[in-house]
Image (tube, rainbow, N blue to C red):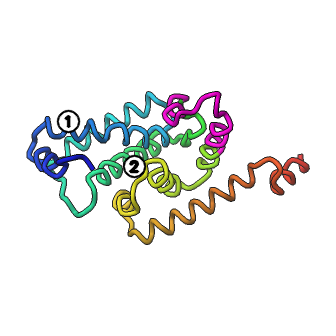
Amino acid sequence: MLDGEIKLIENAVRGKASAFGLLYDHYQPKIYRFVLIKIGRREDAEDLTHQVFLNAWQNISNYKDLGFPFSSWLYRIARNQIIDRYRTKKQEVGLEIVDEEYFSDFGLNEKNLEEKIQLERVMKAMKELKQDYQDVLIMRFVEDLSVKEVAATVEKSEGAVKLMQHRAVKELKKVLEKKMPGSENSTAAQSAK
């Protein structure tokens, strides 16, 4: 949480652009990273992130503190923008084409190639999961949001989010096991070729 965030939100709701600007500066990198992981292309993620904050600014006067962090409201807007984008574009989520810049944010380079390969494997496996599972995993493990924040974002109970997270991790493990060299499923699939 940003220092003095409650006061900033109150001022932003009253129309103070400078207060919203400080909120933007704090939350923009996090929302951008979430959108980038979901969209996969830097340019598209930049455009969509811009739309998220434009939408937030246009609707800030309607913001009500319901006991959830302000970030949950922003993530919900981002999630809805992503869903709308895919409804209109009818494209698949391109997790496998995430820019190299994203990986560099994790400090990945040639020195730790194995980590990068593992991360790419997970990213590719994630695209096989349901959208809700992808969202929960990204928000919990990449964005490090609390269960409460994720629940507010996806508009479900905390118990439902915990269950979704458990199922998503279980499903991701299954997908990864199928894709791992040397696993039974992978060997059976290759011998069938």
Dot 2 falls on a residue whose secondary structure is helix
Q: Is residue 138 magenta?
A: no
Q: Which mark's residue is nearer the viewer, 1 or 2?
A: 1
> Quadrant of residue 159 in the image?
bottom left
Task: Count neighbours of disc 2 (C-alpha within 10 A) and say few if under 14, some if 14 to 19, many if 20 or more.
Answer: many
Q: Amino acid at mark 2?
A: Arg
The reply to whether callout 1 and callout 2 are in contact (CB within 8 Å) is no
Picture coordinates of residue 100, whole percent (x, y): 55, 29
Which one is nearer the viewer's eye here, 80 or 111?
111
The amino acid type found where label 1 is placed reads Gly
Quarter of the C terminus within the rendering: top right
Picture residue at 46% right of the left edge, 55% below the top: 140
In the rendered view, tell whether residue 40 sits above or below residue 132.
Answer: above
Q: Residue at x 57, y 65 (%)?
A: 167
Q: Badge 1 is on which residue?
A: 21
User: Mark on residue 49?
Assistant: none
* Residue pointed to by mark 2: 79
Counting every numbered tag in the picture gives 2
Q: Is residue 61 left or right of residue 117?
A: left
Residue occupying the point 8% across, 46% down: 14
Task: Quote the CA–CA distance across marks 1 and 2.
Answer: 21 Å
Residue at the far front: name it.
111
Q: On screen, 99 above or below 188?
A: above
State the predominant SS element of the stretch in magenta. helix
Residue 124 picture location, percent across and down? 63, 43
Region of the chain picked out in magenta, as a range: 100-121
Residue closest to the eye, 151 or 79: 151
